[in-house]
Image (cartoon, helix red, strand yellow):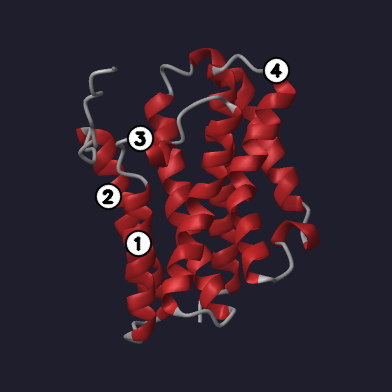
Amino acid sequence: MIHLDLLMSLQLIGIAAFAVSGALVAGERQMDWFGAIVLGVIVAVGGGTLRDVLLDVPVFWIDAPWYIVLAGAAALATIPLARWSQRVRRPISIADAVGLAVFVVLGTQKALDAGTPGFVAILMGLITGIFGGIIRDVLANRSPIILRKEIYALAALTGATLYVLGQYLEVPSMLNLWCSMAVILIIRLLAIARNWSIPTFRIEPGDQE
């Protein structure tokens, strides 16, 4: 079993990392303070909220509203950095990668605990990691990151799949947890550092009659 204190620590890291990334997107779009807080909170809890609704379990932040408070506080603390968003873009991408790794694995584990099949658990982990960012990008009038050529959802999908396989193969819980998160983080960080991307799908427009 994974120690509860470790799970709590990982959740804190993930929430703070995602909230910071959401607030900086708000800064890039020149939103006000309220907009920064809203985007930060949405990124931090959006994916987990949809996951819990789909799993038909209590939404995690309703019984523990401190999740919202922490996300809002992290977003608020980020506002002074917004004017230097260009300089901190890479650190924020790294923070977002950390949040992705944490939430994908924890979301996959929660789905398994709810008794879902492995394939469904993988999808729930993917939703936990990426859905908040999708809402953020839509509200900020940006193309959602998973629809761009960046290696983002692929990293999440790989880590969630590895975690489910580790569970079925009875890999020790802690080893499975850290290895799965490390795979997501390494893939995402390498993609950032080396500008890796998925080939784009292009169709040249035909002649208009």
The residue beneath circle 1 is 159
The residue beneath circle 3 is 148
At label 2, counting other C-alpha atoms closer than 10 Å, the crowd grade (few under 14, some 14-19, many 20 or more) is some
Q: What secondary structure is found at the residue carrying circle 2?
A: helix
Total number of numbered discs in the rendering: 4
Q: Is residue 187 left or right of residue 7?
A: left
Q: CA distance from mark 2 to mark 4?
A: 34 Å
The mark closer to the camera, 1 or 3, is: 3
Instruction: List x then y, in percent, for residue 98.
Output: 43, 47
The amino acid pointed to by label 1 is Gly
Tell me the residue at 32%/69% (across/down). Answer: 162
Q: Is residue 90 visible?
A: yes
The amino acid pointed to by label 4 is Asp
Tell me the residue at 45%/41% (across/down). Answer: 96
Q: CA distance from mark 4 to mark 1?
A: 35 Å
Which of the two discs, 4 and 3, labels the residue nearer the N terminus?
4
Image quadrant where residue 189 sits? top left
> Mark 3–mark 2 contact, CB under 8 Å?
no
Vertically, is 105 above or below 2?
Answer: above
Q: What secondary structure is found at the residue carrying circle 1?
A: helix
Q: What secondary structure is found at the residue carrying circle 3?
A: loop
